[in-house]
Amino acid sequence: MPADLNELKPRLREFLLTQLLRRPSYPLRDDERLISGGLIDSFSLAQIAVYIEEAFGVYIPDTELTVDNMDTLDQMAAQVERWHANGG
Amino acid sequence: MEILSWPFAIFCAVVLAVYYLLERKAQNIWLLAASYFFYATWGWHFPAILLAATLVNYLLAQRIERKTEKKPAWLWAGVGINLLALVAFRLADRMSGGLALPFGVAAAPGEEAGLTRFLLPVGFSFYTLQAISYLLDVSRRQMPASRNPIDFALSMAYFPKLTAGPIERARSFLPLLAAPRRVDNESFGRGITLIAMGLVRKAVIADSLSRFLPPGIFQDPGTFSSLQLAAGIGVYAFVLYNDFAGYTDMVRGVSELFGIPLSPNFRQPYFSRGFIEFWNRWHLSLSFWLRDYIFFPLSRALLRRFPNPRHPLNLALPPMVTMLASGLWHGMTLGMAAWGGLHGIFQWIERLLTIGRPRKPAQSQPVLIQLGTWMVCFTLITLAWVPFATNDLSNALEYWRSLFAFQGGQPEALSVGWILPFIGLSMALDWVQYHSQDELVFLRWVRPAQALLLAMAVVLLVFSMGTGVDVSGFVYQGF
């Protein structure tokens, strides 16, 4: 069952910290640059996209997984909401 | 008509002069006509091939857009036709011996050095990728099929990007062609700066450095000393980069004068401290195309099937398939496959070393570690250029064998004192752009500094031309 979108940001943050950055206590800011800051790469973006599909039932197209759309936690959450609204 | 030539400069001036006099709709028709004329100067039959590719993809996209049971069949037919045409042209070109080889290398034994017989239409590999992404994006409902044949034809044929990219996606490029365009002082300044940077990279750095590549070094490497081979591949790395980055800067600059911005292709790739980072800095329009249409779909499909990201297939398959596709796109030879395969292995190993470990950005590492990782990456990337340069696996193996045989000898034909200033200039240009995170940082300098820089660029250009540098064609026009 897809998770509630109200839990979106905390769940995304937890996934990023525990599964990708492997630093659960890292003080990740909502606007911290993850791709352009060198913290995550295209392998990680694929993982995030699949996590979003499974946790929230939202499909973000491959061509939208860009630094312009997915660089920060804020941007990731906005993309999930956008594609949820689009029936993604 | 070579991009770096007086006829092209005159052609651009004429096209621009008429363009500014026309209203927007007429501007697109004029640009389309100019683009087909430009293409005809490369080969009388090339416009017919481009027109056929344009018509087929324009009609197929409209079929694909319809919600019918046959939609997947039309999509695969479209992708298949484009890929088959690319493979067929590449094979025919290879069998005819007309493969474009850079820097004075004979296309076939006995032929004049530098001669290229383009059976493969110049630019075909570039606009084929644009067409495939268009069909896929229409199929995924990320854009509507174009109903404007002029704009669609122009998106395929637009002359600044026709021969060697950047590879623009129809999804972002068609709206640019439909929007009102205004060329003001700012875009004119960007255009001229890009053209000047491109000229310096191509005519001053790449073509000057290519003079120091001894003839035959990539065809008969066994006859050269280890020192010559090491210097040779190091020089080649900077020749290739500045040649392609110079081309891209120039065509982007020309396009700015028409009020149509093109995508950047490079972000100081030789400062990368990782191989994944390198592909986020080198030939971006191709790299992102491969990422979006091969790497991501494959990675996501595998992760759904094998959720553990450390599964060997998740680690190895996406980078290997993506980079092999990149190699074969450059040429259907074992040499190009080896070059792509090596980059696939580099990314696989990098992922293997970093997955499961706490992630820190490269720039927050101690300086010595940053320097060490940069040196390892730069060395391996440079060594991987060997099969790219030889375009032949047996010559590449011979090159590496002779390089690591550590045979003595002086780098006679490679005068280090002459090479280093050009490599230094390339690195200095990159350094300024890297630190400001702005490729056009020069436009923010005070006027006297801008004037001094422009004067230096002119002096360097005149000096390079005056010393008999052969301003040759661009390497990537051969792909």
Image: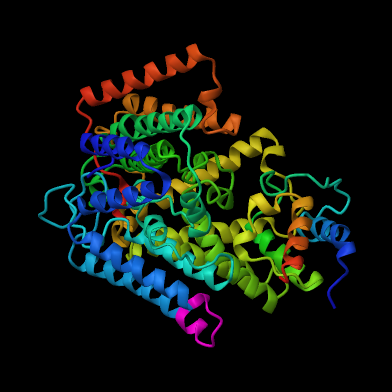
Total number of numbered labels?
0
In the rendered image, residue B6, in percent from the top left (x then y), is placed at: 22, 34
In the rendered image, residue B392, in percent from the top left (x then y), is placed at: 30, 60
In the rendered image, residue B15, in percent from the top left (x then y), is placed at: 29, 40
Residue B10 vertical placement versus B98 (above, below) = above
A2 falls in the magenta region: no
Quadrant (top left, top right, bottom left, bottom right) of the C terminus of chain B:
bottom left
| Furthest-front residue in this view | B23
Which color scheme did the rendering employ for the protein? rainbow
Q: Is residue B400 visible?
A: no
Q: Nearer the viewer, residue A33 or B311?
A: A33
Left or right of B429? Residue B85 is: left
Q: Is residue B77 visible?
A: yes
Left or right of B174? Residue A27 is: right
Residue A82 vertical placement versus B180 (above, below) = below
Asked where in the image residue A8 lies, by quadrant, the reply is: bottom right
Asked where in the image residue A10 lies, by quadrant, the reply is: bottom right
| Furthest-bottom residue in this view | B69
* Magenta residues, start to end: B64-74
In the rendered image, residue B424, in percent from the top left (x then y), is placed at: 43, 27
Quadrant (top left, top right, bottom left, bottom right) of the N terminus of chain B:
top left
Q: Residue at x 49, y 68 (%)?
A: B145
Q: Residue at x 18, y 47 (%)?
A: B114
Left or right of B317? Residue B358 is: right
Q: Nearer the viewer, residue B49 or B305?
A: B49
B66 falls in the magenta region: yes
Q: Nearer the viewer, residue B469 or B72?
A: B72
| Furthest-left residue in this view | B110
